[in-house]
Amino acid sequence: MKKAVFVYSPEQLGYKFSDTHPFNHKRLTLTMDLLKNIDALKDIDIVPARVATEEELLLAHDPKYIDIVKRAGHGELTEAQGESYGIGTEDTPIFKNMHEASAQLVGGTLTAVDYVMEGKSEHALNLGGGLHHGFRGRASGFCIYNDSTVAIRYLQEKYKARVLYVDTDAHHGDGVQWSFYEDPDVCTLSIHETGRYLFPGTGNITERGNGQGYGTSFNFPIDAFTEDESFLDIYEKAMREVFEFFKPDVVLTQNGADAHYFDPLTHLYGTMNIYKEIPKLAHKLAHEYCGGKWIAVGGGGYDIWRVVPRAWSMLWLEMTDQEMPAGALPQAWLDRWQPEAPVPFIPTWEDPIPLYEPIPRKAEIEEKNAQMLDKALHIIRIEKRV
Amino acid sequence: MIVEEIMNEEPYTLAPTNTVLEALKLMREKKVRHLPVVDEDHHVLGVITERDIKEALPSSLQDEPNSAVFNAAVEEIMVKNPLVGHPLDFVEEVALTFYESKVGCLPIVSGGKLVGIVTTTDLLYTYIELTGATEPGSKIEIRVSDTPGILFEITKIFNAHHANVQSVLVYPDSENTQNKILSVRVKTLNPLAMIEDLRKKGFDVLWPNLPGVSL
């Protein structure tokens, strides 16, 4: 069995709102080129992303909404008509063939699922996916179709699997959470910057699921300026306890790379360290609990030059048990892309130390995060005691 | 916003002759802490709260599970002639009543009859909705001078970006009484262009304010 496959098709780059929109899949090209430059990604590792069928999209979306997306992408819908569906807004503008491009991203995640569940590879990565804000009948936050929701339903129907969804994007994974809010066989875990300020505003610790699904939604809203140590402390404790509690058959991780200091849309002040550690623990726990079954998708990440290629490369390196690189980035890669980049590259795998000025209220922020973690996990800790 | 829009229009009620035990059971079963007591024509006679019952009962540390209090009629321990509200009261008036009179609920009366009930919990949820926190959005905080027309200048910028404003809260600036702080929640993941325009027009954007922000 292969260690991991890298799902990618050039058609995934068709998911493009405009040249100035922050969501930019050029980051896929940059990441792949970086990995190829260090000889960590070979052509035989890459499998093409299939296109999700309409029937598959219906696992998570309303037929009416799919029709709206199709019409928008074929020039048959005005912005005003699309507005109540979240289409044609500043966040999710209309672009040509938006249905086809979105279905291609969903298909990529389904391809990843099939590779893992059919035993063709232990793990699989679809960096084009991770569109966690998409709702059943509405686009939101740059996301049209929610590939993770479709993939989890597909995992349930085709493979009868109990799925743990882990979301480390700096924004709350609201779309996926609400899809499975009442489902006891899907557990969602999201660690994100608190919604007091940041989009989408949800993801409070009190959102724990509903009805039969009560107790299978976990949220860890961390404060702005959290920094690496506290982020990783919360992540590690949350992951271990939730894995132990839920005992999933398979884990799907969403790997937004927007918690970094450079990211323009968030304020968590993470560094490259967290992107080294996040996949390491997911990998380890997937082997401990799920016989290795680990599907990973991309997500947010709005500094596509300095942050995303390095962060996502580390994810692939971890999945394939390759040694974590250190020191200088390949000169050929820097030379190729620097002329296009509006910012000077960080020329090494690590971030410079210090990357930014010290945060004045560090101790209080860490204390607050730790308190939040205790409250969020209280529900499973008491169950354990009984 | 008026009370009619947030009140519970079908409150559970008791007759004055119902027992304290019945009141307690109803509260536990329906997960409520306040029950209006009404006569046959739905005139409000009183209110009984979970706290009234607790105060009437002997201490739970004493071993008296069959206290005579349980069999007493609720009219004996209810608050008679309670404060009531009207469906057309403003929500903020009710909030002030709760705060000043230290009560946790108001039976809402119209035409002499009970038509609803409002509790502090309903008000709290209304407050949460007012902040816009129940819909996807990003928060922007702006310090502005306390002068007429400022809000118009700000909303022009949101309008130019086709942005859907979910809520606007205005509160005093603790540092300078000449200023106000506007806290706006906008339906977007990417508020950067709007923030840039606000700054270009000379507005003091407090959040997001990077880097080196003071918390």
Image: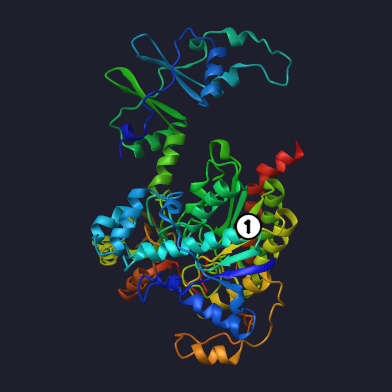
Q: Is residue B141 left or right of residue A314?
A: left
In this picture, is A19 found above or below A149?
A: below
In the image, A150: left or right of A142?
Answer: right
At 61% across and 65% down in the image, what residue appears?
A124
Residue A342 x/y as whole percent = 44, 85
Residue A320 image position (x, y, % from top left): 68, 71
Q: Residues within 10 Å of mark 1 (few under 14, many from 20)?
A: few
Q: Is residue A309 left or right of residue A146?
A: right
> Where is residue B110 drawn, in percent x and y?
29, 22
- Observer-nearest of A115 and A68: A115
Q: Quadrant of residue A382?
A: top right
Residue of label 1 = A118
Q: Position of residue A259 (x, y in %)?
A: 55, 68
Q: Amino acid at mark 1?
A: Glu
Residue closer to the observer: B88 or B163: B163
Residue B162: in sight, yes or no? yes
The vertical placement of A330 against A45, above or below, is below
Looking at the picture, tell me which residue is in the foreground, A16 or B16. Answer: A16
